Image (spheres, helix red, strand yellow):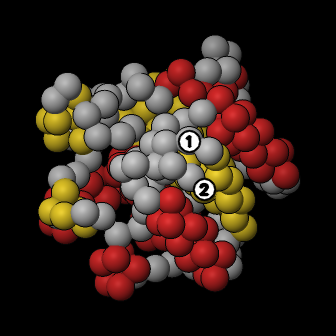
Amino acid sequence: MLNSPMFYELRRPQQINPDQTYPALFLMHGIGSNEQNMLSLVHGLEDKFFIFSIRGHLMQPPGFAFFTIEGYGKPHREVFDQAVNKLTNFIDYACEQYPLDKDKLYLMGFSQGAILAMTLGLSLGSKIKGIIALSGYIPAFVKEEYKIQSVEQLSAFISHGEMDQVLPFEWGVANHEYFRVLGAKVTFRTYPDGHTISMENYQDFMKWLLNDLNKYKGETKKC
């Protein structure tokens, strides 16, 4: 981790075949949390994936954050851009350091992490195979000013609680519509919950991820 752009926790298959490359899953936590928080949600997937659980680089007691907020639904632009750049560099770093299949890179996040997963999906385009965005939104400046790449090859699982008291349910609906109009393959799920990840949500995204992974047929390529 000495040369890594960000601090992270790694889970990977116990037996690594030196002639094989592996799918990767990059996890991004919510505000005030840390890199341990998301790992329980993907327990068991380390048999199939290299899992990188990334710690936000900003202190946000009792944990960390990836960016700060200027107003409701509006991150500080400079801080947000820095987070996007750091995470993009981290994905490149992981591809250089580990035997990852560049055609099977997935991003998963909750809240702040979901915001970044969707933004990275839009800014990296075909470099990303799929995203799991749990209770987030796409900042207006991302839609208006970022260079949006083609997402026609992207698979997206987007979910939102119908009683989310932190980020309105309508924002989840807007996320779905935005990716759908751009041509991404979107699965949108809603739950009668607040700003949380329910057991049903967990079961749905796990099933979606494994199905999406198994759909893909083709040669593996190193990053």
Q: Is residue 173 above or below residue 46?
A: below
- Amino acid type at circle 2 is Ile
Q: Is residue 25 above or below residue 215?
A: above
Sooner in the amino-acid sequence: mark 2 or mark 1: 2
Lateral position of residue 26 relative to residue 70, left or right: right
Mark yes or no: residue 26 visible.
Answer: no
- Amino acid type at circle 1 is Asp
Residue annotated with mark 2: 158
Mark yes or no: residue 173 visible.
Answer: yes
On the image, the x and y values in percent for residue 138 come to 41, 67
Lateral position of residue 201 relative to residue 137, left or right: right
Q: Residue at x 64, y 14 (%)?
A: 14
Residue sitting at the far top: 14
Give SS at disc 2. Answer: strand
Give SS at disc 1. Answer: loop
Q: Residue at x 16, y 29 (%)?
A: 61
Q: Is the C-beta separation of discs 2 and 1 under 8 Å?
A: no
> Dot 2, how many residues are within 10 Å of its Cα: few (below 14), some (14-19), or many (20+)?
many
On the image, the x and y values in percent for residue 85 come to 28, 59
Residue annotated with mark 1: 193
Q: Nearer the viewer, mark 2 or mark 1?
A: 1
Q: Out of 163 and 85, give the one closest to the viewer.
A: 163
On the image, the x and y values in percent for residue 118 come to 48, 61
Residue 142, by quadrant, is bottom left
